[in-house]
Amino acid sequence: MLDFLLNWFSQEDNDSVIFQIAQLIQAIGGHSISGKDIRKIFALLRSEKVGMRRQYCSVLLTSLLAMLHEKGPTAFFDLDGIDSVSPEAIIDVSLDLLIFL
């Protein structure tokens, strides 16, 4: 989602839409941001379209600063579907449910 917003930010021409996109980037990035997304933000700051307009740089840097100050979770689970849960655990849970029913 953040990748989509950063792409949109770089292509949008309407200032009010850009400010709203920056707010969404800030909200989503405050919860979770990858190294790839951070690199993309810095690439945007170096790009001709965003880098040449001070207000775009300012709003993007302000969003980045707000992300850094956001208090995130102390722990989280990354269940990406690849080896997230062992098959044995699924079978054990399934058997327990069958016995319970």
Image: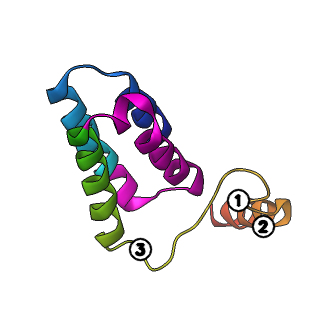
Mark 1 or 3: the one toward you: 3
Q: Which residue is drawn at 39% across and 54% down?
A: 29
| Residue 28 located left or right of residue 33 | left
Q: Which is more toward the observer, 67 or 74?
A: 67
Image x and y of residue 58, in percent:
24, 49
Write down the residue under mark 2: 89
Position of the C terminus by quadrant: bottom right
Badge 2 or badge 1: first in the primary sequence = 2
Mark 3 lies on a secondary structure that is loop
Write down the residue under mark 3: 73
Mark 3 or 2: the one toward you: 3
Q: Which residue is drawn at 45% across and 35% down?
A: 47
| Mark drawn on residue 98 | 1
Q: Is residue 45 magenta?
A: yes
Query: Distance from label 1 to label 3 (Cα)?
Result: 35 Å
Q: Which is more toward the observer, 23 or 49?
A: 49
User: Quarter-wise, where is residue 79 in the image?
Assistant: bottom right
Mark 2 lies on a secondary structure that is helix
| Residue 75 located left or right of residue 90 | left
Dot 3 amino acid type = Pro
Q: Is residue 81 in sight in this rendering?
A: yes
Question: What stretch of residues is rendered in magenta?
Answer: 27-53
Answer few, some or many: residues within 10 Å of disc 3's Cα (few below 14, many 20 plus, some between 14 and 19).
Answer: few
